Amino acid sequence: HRQLLAGTASRRVVFLSEEKAGVCREKILHVLNATMIAEMETTRLLEKQQKQQRNRRRRYEKLREIRHNHNMRLLVSLLIALTFLIMGAIGYMVNTVFGAMFTNGTETSTVGLLYPVESETREAKKLDGMWNFVRSDSSNPSQGLREKWFSDDLAKFRPTIGMPVPSSYNDVTEDASIRDHVGT
C-alpha cells in the first residue's frame, strides 16, 4: 500500500489501491475479529471443560467419601456383631461349665449361709439344735468375753435362755429387753 501511494501512479490507481487497501484492511480486521472470536470461543470451551472436569472430580471425591463412610459403617457393624457373638459364646461356655459343676451330683445344694457347703478347705458341721444363751449386763456388754463364758458350761453358773438354732429372737421370747439386747 505504501509503495502504491509513494509511486508515480495516477490518482485513480491510488484511489483504487486505497479502496483495495480498505478492503484488505476490512478483510484483515474481519479475520482478526473472527480469530479473536474463535480464541474467545476456544477459551470459553476450555473454561467450560475445566469447570466440568472440576465438577466431575468434586463429585468423584464426594462419592469416594460416601463409599468410605459406608464401608466404615459396615466395618463397625460387623465388629459389633462379632463382639456380641463372642460374648454370647463366652456366656454359653460359662453357663455350660457352671451347669456341669452343679449338676454332676457330687455337690449337695443347700440354701442360705446357715448351711455351708463342705469342700476341700471347709469342714461343714451341723450346728442345728437348742443352744443356751446367757444374757450379759446391759451396762457391761463385754462381760462375757472378759470372763470367758465360752470356756465353761453356762448352765452350771448362770440361768440360761434356750434358743433353737436357726431361729430369730422373736421365736424365743416376747420380752423386749431380751429381744433388743446388745451384748455377748
Image (tube, rainbow, N blue to C red):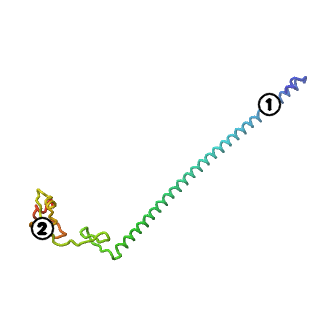
Q: Choose between 4 and 93: the one closer to the eye.
A: 93
88 sits left or right of 41 in the view: left
- The residue under label 1 is 25
Identify which amino acid the numbered label 1 is placed on.
Answer: Arg
Image x and y of residue 157, in percent: 9, 67
Q: Which residue is painted at 11% across and 58% down in the image?
A: 138
Alpha-carbon distance for marks 2 and 1? Answer: 143 Å
Image coords of residue 176 (percent x, y): 11, 62
Residue type highlighted by circle 2: Leu
Q: Nearer the viewer, residue 182 or 122?
A: 122
Q: Is residue 115 left or right of residue 175?
A: right
Q: Position of residue 162 (x, y in %)?
A: 12, 69
Q: Residue at x 31, y 69 (%)?
A: 121
Please state, as top left, top right, bottom left or bottom right, where the C terminus lies in the image.
bottom left
Q: Is residue 5 above or below residue 136?
A: above
Q: Secondary structure at mark 2?
A: helix
Q: Nearer the viewer, residue 78 or 154?
A: 154
Say which residue label 2 marks: 154
Position of 73 with respect to 51 (left or right) is: left
Q: What secondary structure is found at the residue carrying circle 1? A: helix
Q: Which mark is residue 146?
A: none
Q: Dividing the picture into quarters, in which one does residue 38 lie? A: top right
